Image (cartoon, rainbow, N blue to C red):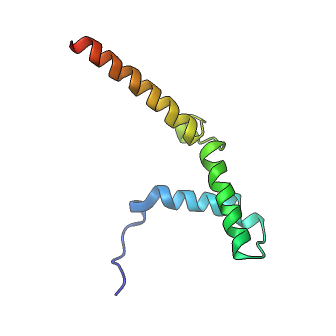
Amino acid sequence: MSRKATPPYDNACVESFFATLKKEYIYRFVFRTKAEAIEAIDFYIQFYNRKRMHSTLGYASPIEYEKAYEQAHRQDAKKNLTTSA
């Protein structure tokens, strides 16, 4: 038996990523082999996470955004430790 259908918004982030992958990369090339396609998709995933700017992240890459987020929360944690003592 198949899994019960779920509303499309359950996986909105994943659906958005795959739509972007197809539009920006997959549909622009012809891959001769499965290995070639896998290598190309791996390249795009690296680009997407490290270089591609995302408007929802303030035009930062996910890696840049995550670093800034961690740094800000580390500073907040230090403030909380010093003020609670």
Residue 38 location, x and y as percent? 66, 67
Residue appearing at x 38%, y 61% in the figure:
10
Residue appearing at x 28%, y 17% in the figure:
81
Q: Is residue 84 above or below residue 63?
A: above
Q: Is residue 50 above or below residue 35?
A: above
- The image quadrant that residue 62 belongs to is top right
Q: Is residue 2 left or right of residue 49?
A: left
Quarter of the image where the C terminus is located:
top left
Residue 12 location, x and y as percent? 45, 58
Residue 50 location, x and y as percent? 63, 43
Residue 1 location, x and y as percent? 34, 87
- The image quadrant that residue 80 belongs to is top left
Residue appearing at x 34%, y 18% in the figure:
78
Single out the residue that lies furthest toward the left. 85
Q: Is residue 81 above or below residue 63?
A: above
Between 79 and 14, which is closer to the camera in this rendering?
A: 79
Residue appearing at x 69%, y 56% in the figure:
43
Give the total number of marks visible in the rendering.
0
Between 48 and 85, which is closer to the camera in this rendering?
A: 85
Single out the residue that lies furthest toward the bottom. 1
